[in-house]
Image (cartoon, helix red, strand yellow):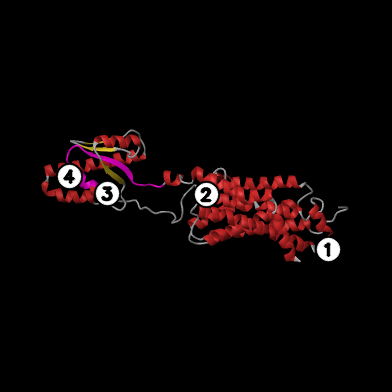
Amino acid sequence: MFLHNLKYEFLNNIRQKESLFWLMCFPIILGTFFYMGFGKLYEKEEMFSEIPVAVTFAKEDAVFESVIGKMKNADDSLFEFRYADTDKAEKMLKKGDVFGIITVDDEISLTVISSGIEQSIIKSFLDQYKSQRQIISDISAVDPAGLTEAVKALHTETDTIKNNSPTNGNMNYYDMYFMNLITMAALFGMITGLYSAINNQGNLSAVGARKCLSPNIGFITIASSLLAGCITQLCSVILTTSFVLFILKIDLGGNILMIYLTGALGAFAGVSIGFFIGSAGRMSEAVKGAISTSVSLFCCFLSGLMVGNMKTIIEEKCPVINSINPAAIISDMLYYLTIEAGYTRYIEKAAALLIISLFFITGGFLMTRRKTYENL
């Protein structure tokens, strides 16, 4: 009997065209717009790459040519030097192919047409080169014997700053939007959970009235309906997650199975909350549907789906909200998979999400238990 009910509940769920749009199509459409809007912004704005610089020799300078030759051959070169004559260099600068022109004449000069970080770095390099060259020239004139030691000292890099990354994981800020997209897809399970509750209440739907009149055990009927809702929602989350990982190619860490597990736990939480809302009170299906949609979107808003730093703001002002917001918990779980090698904090968040889910699903069962009607 349980499997029979499960089969037809699942078939009923996938026939709900309006629900399927919100569960499966809307997250993909929104994710596409996210990717079009800022999918490559991190690479363009945050990740550092070699700075293209045009170099024009109006006069031979073997020393400077040797310096830039060594820099070009370095594995982690700061600049991409492009040799060109004056006319070609000016055209490249106007087109934006290079950030500046280094002209080597009696004096080494820099030409730019705008200001920015790249131009400042080029200027700093030239200032340092001129300074060191002047020091060597002065020492050569005053104390030629000490020239060798001076050159060694200038070539010895004294670095008191160690470059330690806080994590080996993905530091792309914009990928948080895609984590929240998966979170939203999971919490849209409120829709299927809501229908599971409504379709088992005789005063809210015709299907519910027929179920109440049937000889089937109420608990088995509701449990099969909930499981069908979870399976439907799991399919939705798998589709959205696969789209994000394999079509958009967003880096959410290498543990693919754990990412899907997170989506499954989120789907269970969404269905549980929707089931609770559907079981509460005697409001119409339309009203309960509006409440569940509003709750899911509001939770996602607080976790940063619409405003990327919203969760950070809440953590500073009222951190308890992030502790009980299922959307924030799910996005945190995905975030920990991305930046951490261990699972300590992930397990803590997963346990919190399961407790919230069990709380709502138990509340829903208690409200539907032994419900009777005067007439149907």
3D distance between C-alphas at marks 2 and 1: 49 Å
Q: What residue type is labelled 3?
A: Lys
Q: Name the residue under label 3.
A: 72
Residue 26 coordinates in the image, percent (x, y) = 61, 47
Residue 225 or residue 11, whichever sits in front? 11
User: Magenta segment: does it hold 104?
Assistant: no
Q: Residue at x 28, y 40 (%)?
A: 54
User: Magenta segment: does it hold 58?
Assistant: yes
Q: Which of marks 2 and 3 is nearer the N terminus?
A: 3
- Taking 65 as reference, is 112 left or right? right
Residue 41 coordinates in the image, percent (x, y) = 46, 44
Magenta residues, as a range?
Answer: 47-68
Residue 127 coordinates in the image, percent (x, y) = 26, 40
Residue 311 in sight: no
Q: Mark 1 points at which residue?
A: 215
Q: Which residue is drawn at 75% across and 58% down?
A: 365
3D distance between C-alphas at marks 2 and 3: 36 Å
Q: Please, what secondary structure does the residue beneath circle 1 have?
A: loop
Residue 173 coordinates in the image, percent (x, y) = 48, 48
Q: Earlier in the sequence, mark 4 or mark 3?
A: 4
